[in-house]
């Protein structure tokens, strides 16, 4: 019985479907574990399973609340903006302490850093498949993340070269350039994309982190000092050479090693 009172009412579910209203329905967190335990303890015919992992359906509800900044929950957009504000401050400090003639660089990831796939992820119920999502990349589907665009423009105003390093493949170059441009990004220094058919490598584990570090080595070899790197995955930021400062944006929606 204790579970029943916590379930969505039909009216609430209907409101969610009809009006996509997050606030009332978003408070649902599933059965209260303590109430469930108490119910089982009071009924000797009731056996609880040992759940081996969190419930996927309930996790998706929490993700949607976070993504939609539903009342009473944390807020993805607010967290993004707080981190990009820190990034702007770090960039400005680095430039202020730079030496004359130095070539400073800002490195940006693309997906969930410069462009947002959130609408697509929500449409797909968070079943994110990067290649499918990127293949469908379009300006309407992937708008700029406002704080990162602010950082990009600030870097340009300060004379800092901006490099994009993305896990997208080169086959998506034209769509990605069009998407970045229409989202407001202009005049970047270079866009590094993964080759469509990587050459055979002695590296048995070609992770995103290793690929991205290799691109940063090219930037350093070209004479730049990478003062700031911003990404939504640790694999955007890990590996040598590191940027002098790295800013991790929130992304609870998927993980890339
Ligand atoms: Mg990303």
Image: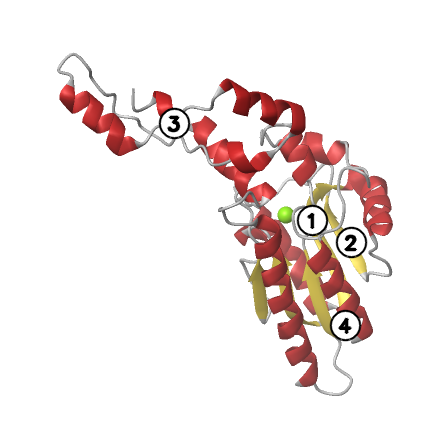
- From the viewer's perspective, is residue 172 above or below residue 245? above
Q: Which tag is nearer the camera, tag 4 or tag 2? A: 4
Q: Which tag is nearer the camera, tag 4 or tag 3? A: 3
Pointer 1 local density, CA inside 10 Å: few below 14, some 14–19, many at least 20: many
The verdict on label 3 being within 8 Å of ligand 1 is: no
User: Which residue, given by chain and number where applicable, does mark 3 sit on?
Assistant: 6
Question: Which tag, 2 or 3, sits closer to the chain's start?
Answer: 3
Residue depicted at x 79% and y 66%:
153
Q: Tell whether 195 sits left or right of 238.
A: right
Q: Tell whether 27 sits left or right of 34.
A: right
Q: Which mark is residue 166?
A: 1
The verdict on label 1 being within 8 Å of ligand 1 is: yes
List x then y, in percent, for residue 144: 75, 50
Q: Element under label 4?
A: loop
* Residue contact at pointers 1 and 2, CB within 8 angstroms: yes
Q: Tell whether 103 sits left or right of 73.
A: right
User: Which residue, given by chain and number where applicable, does mark 2 sit on?
Assistant: 191
Q: Which mark is residue 250?
A: none
Q: Tell whether 28 sits left or right of 98.
A: left
Q: Residue 160 carries which label?
A: 4
* Residue contact at pointers 1 and 4, CB within 8 angstroms: no
Residue in the foreground of this view, choosing between 197 and 75:
75
Question: Which tag, 1 or 4, sits closer to the chain's start?
Answer: 4
Q: Which tag is nearer the camera, tag 1 or tag 3? A: 3
Say which quadrant the N terminus sits in. top left
Question: Which tag, 4 or 3, sits closer to the chain's start?
Answer: 3
């Amino acid at each position: 019985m204790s579970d029943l009172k916590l379930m969505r009412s039909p009216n609430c579910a209907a409101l969610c479907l009809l009006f996509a209203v997050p606030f009332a329905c978003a408070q649902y967190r599933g059965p209260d574990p303590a109430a469930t335990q108490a119910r089982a303890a009071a009924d000797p015919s009731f056996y609880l399973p040992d759940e081996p992992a969190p419930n996927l359906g309930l996790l998706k509800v929490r993700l949607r609340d976070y993504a939609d900044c539903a009342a009473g929950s944390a807020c993805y957009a607010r967290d993004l903006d707080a981190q990009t504000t820190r990034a702007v401050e770090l960039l400005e400090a680095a430039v202020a302490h730079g030496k004359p003639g130095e070539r400073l660089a800002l490195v940006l990831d693309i997906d969930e850093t410069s462009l947002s796939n959130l609408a697509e992820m929500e449409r797909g119920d968070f079943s994110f498949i990067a290649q499918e999502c990127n293949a469908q990349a379009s300006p309407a589907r992937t708008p700029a993340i406002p704080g990162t665009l602010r950082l990009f423009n600030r870097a340009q105003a300060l004379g800092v070269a901006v490099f994009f390093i993305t896990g997208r493949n080169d086959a998506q170059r034209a769509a990605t350039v069009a998407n970045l441009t229409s989202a407001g990004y202009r005049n970047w220094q270079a866009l590094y994309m993964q080759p469509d058919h990587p050459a055979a490598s002695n590296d048995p584990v070609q992770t995103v982190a290793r690929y991205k570090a290799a691109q940063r080595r090219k930037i350093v070899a070209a004479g730049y000092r990478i003062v700031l790197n911003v990404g939504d995955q640790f694999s955007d930021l890990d590996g040598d050479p590191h940027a002098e400062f790295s800013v991790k944006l929130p992304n609870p929606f998927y993980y890339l090693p």
